[in-house]
Amino acid sequence: MERKAGGFSMVEVLVSIVVLAIGVLGAAGLQLSALRTASQSHLHSNALQLAIELADRMRANDDRMRLDDESNPFVGLDYQATSGLPAEPGTNCFSHACDAAALAAFDLYEWQKRIHAALPGGRAVICRDSAPWDEAKKRLSWDCLQTGSASASLVIKIGWQAREPDGALTKDVEGESLPVIALVVSPYVP
């Protein structure tokens, strides 16, 4: 009885290489998705820290924050990082004594600079809003409902050019990036 020599045929080797290549491509895709998710998580964390920081500064400057919306330096801010750096305030409160109004302007300037540096295509809105969450669309909204009304909460909204795990930009139907953070600074209490 004759014995055949053992080993792998060329077809078996090619099939195993194809299966290995598919596995490596799948692992690479998962790694890319994990990196994108980690990056967005980092941006989310930065945005939340920025919102909390400004809320604390606003509460520290309580006499300015409690003014009516016409006089309140915080209400009505709509900063978009794509428009460039914000205009410098008249007084640098690091090197000069500032009253409450100058301190509010300086705090907003410094905060907007950090938004510009930390968030790609960042946008920040501060307004009175009774419903930051749009129930119909199941997402946060840039719109400020009841602006100018004392019966709405004071809210900081922050967003940036976020990406989905597949790499696509997160935008609404108008092509605008969506708010990701909505922090209530001063809730309306009837």
Image: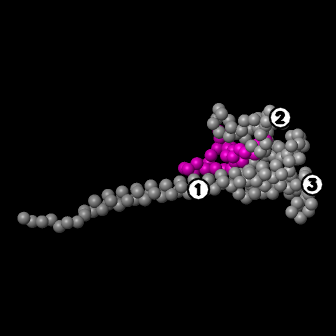
Mark positioned earlier in the residue sequence (1 or 2): 1
State the image coordinates of residue 59 (x, y, percent, origin top left): 82, 49
Question: Label 1: few (<14), some or many (≥20) within 10 Å?
Answer: few
Residue depicted at 56% across the width and 57% down the height: 35
Q: CA distance from mark 3 to mark 2?
A: 27 Å
Mark positioned earlier in the residue sequence (3 or 1): 1
Verify CB contact (< 8 Å) between mark 3 and mark 1: no
Quadrant location of the C terminus in the rendered image:
top right
State the image coordinates of residue 179 (x, y, percent, origin top left): 69, 44
Is residue 142 depicted above or below 6 in this figure?
above
State the image coordinates of residue 126 (x, y, percent, origin top left): 78, 44
Residue 11, quarter of picture: bottom left
Q: Is residue 160 magenta?
A: yes
Residue where numbered disc 3 is placed: 99
**The disc label shown at residue 149, or none:** 2
Total tally of numbered discs in the picture? 3
Residue depicted at 7% across the width and 64% down the height: 1
Mark positioned earlier in the residue sequence (3 or 2): 3
Quick one: SS at disc 3?
loop
Comparing 179 with 120, the one in front is 179
Q: Which residues are magenta?
A: 154-183
Quick one: SS at disc 1?
helix
Identity, as a three-letter code, of the amino acid under mark 1: Ala
Comparing 118 with 121, the one in front is 118
Q: CA distance from mark 3 to mark 1?
A: 41 Å
Q: CA distance from mark 1 to mark 2?
A: 39 Å
Quick one: SS at disc 2?
loop
Q: Which secondary structure type mostly characterizes the magenta part of the structure?
A: loop
Identity, as a three-letter code, of the amino acid under mark 2: Ser
Residue where numbered disc 1 is placed: 38
Residue 66, quarter of picture: top right
